[in-house]
Image (spheres, grey):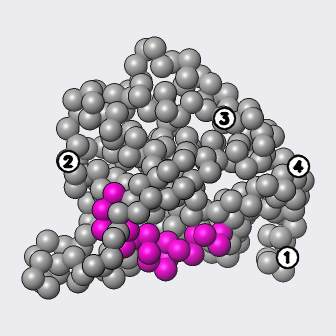
Amino acid sequence: MANKRKIINDPVFGFLTIPNELVYDVLQHPYVQRLSRIRQLGLSDLVYPGALHSRFGHSLGAMHLMQEAITALRMKGVEITEEESTAAQIAILLHDIGHGPFSHVLEHTLVDGVTHEDISLLMMERINNDLMMRYAPNGDATLNGGPLDMAIAIFKNEYPKHFLHQLISSQLDVDRMDYLCRDSFFTGVQEGRVASERLLKMLDVRDDRLVVQVKGIYSVEKFLVARRLMYWQVYLHKTSVAAEQHLIKILSR
């Protein structure tokens, strides 16, 4: 049987661990592998030549930060089972799977009135169906549902522990932590660097909501400032925006 507990060398966070067989099989699905051919920053390489990194690398980095967040919360006594941990990691791994070519650039051009989150959910459900028989007990997929049911519930914020969804989508989620660090690294814009490790260690849960310890407030302020500076310098750079609008107009015509 093939070894499915892999280690991946990431240029931003170092060695990332694939925790179990289910996560590995999700990673190997064609819908996930296609992310390696989708640029994270669209046409920003016209301004920053190094900005050629992919959505696949971002998804792996976000999954790694989810692992770190869960470890930090467990150390504070927050109860998170192994099944919940795996589901949260899969949910963040697949959160951007619905992106098309050039990421956000074509989101409202190729498909009108449908967000990439809507497409992500549809693709997650398809992957769930594809893996259902492989992980069904005794070959009967009707007994316990699909292996990604919990991950999809967390993604849709329908799982009872709502703080897990906050780790995926909120004002201080692991998605933003990764893309700020990653986009800063590949563009060379140092203002985007954030202390993700410290931010994660400052997280806690109260009344089923993520909170930040008082001593972490300055790290949160740095995070907010870094995000604003990255919008000014990278995401809304006039040359990138002009190129994106040019591409959108061509496809619209």
**Camera-side mark, 3 or 4:** 3
Q: What stretch is highlighted in magenta?
A: 19-38
Spatial CA span between label 2 and label 1: 49 Å
**Camera-side mark, 4 or 1:** 4
**Camera-side mark, 2 or 4:** 2
33, 171: nearer the viewer: 33
Helix, strand or loop status at disc 2: loop
Q: Which mark is residue 193?
A: 3
Q: In which quarter of the image is the C terminus?
A: bottom right
Q: In which quarter of the image is the N terminus?
A: bottom left
Spatial CA span between label 3 and label 2: 31 Å
- Residue that label 2 marks: 81
Measuring from the top left, give residue 234's x and y in whole percent: 78, 45
- Residue that label 1 marks: 250
Q: In which quarter of the image is residue 103?
A: bottom right
Q: What residue type is labelled 4?
A: Lys
Residue 241 lies in the magenta-colored region: no
Cβ atoms at labels 4 and 1 below 8 Å apart: no
Neighbour tally class for label 2: few under 14, some 14-19, many 20 plus, Cα within 10 Å: few
- Residue that label 4 marks: 238
- Whichever of callouts 2 and 4 sits on the residue coming sooner in the sequence is 2
Residue at coordinates 20% horizontally, 38% vertically from top-left?
Answer: 79
Overall secondary structure of the magenta stretch?
Answer: helix
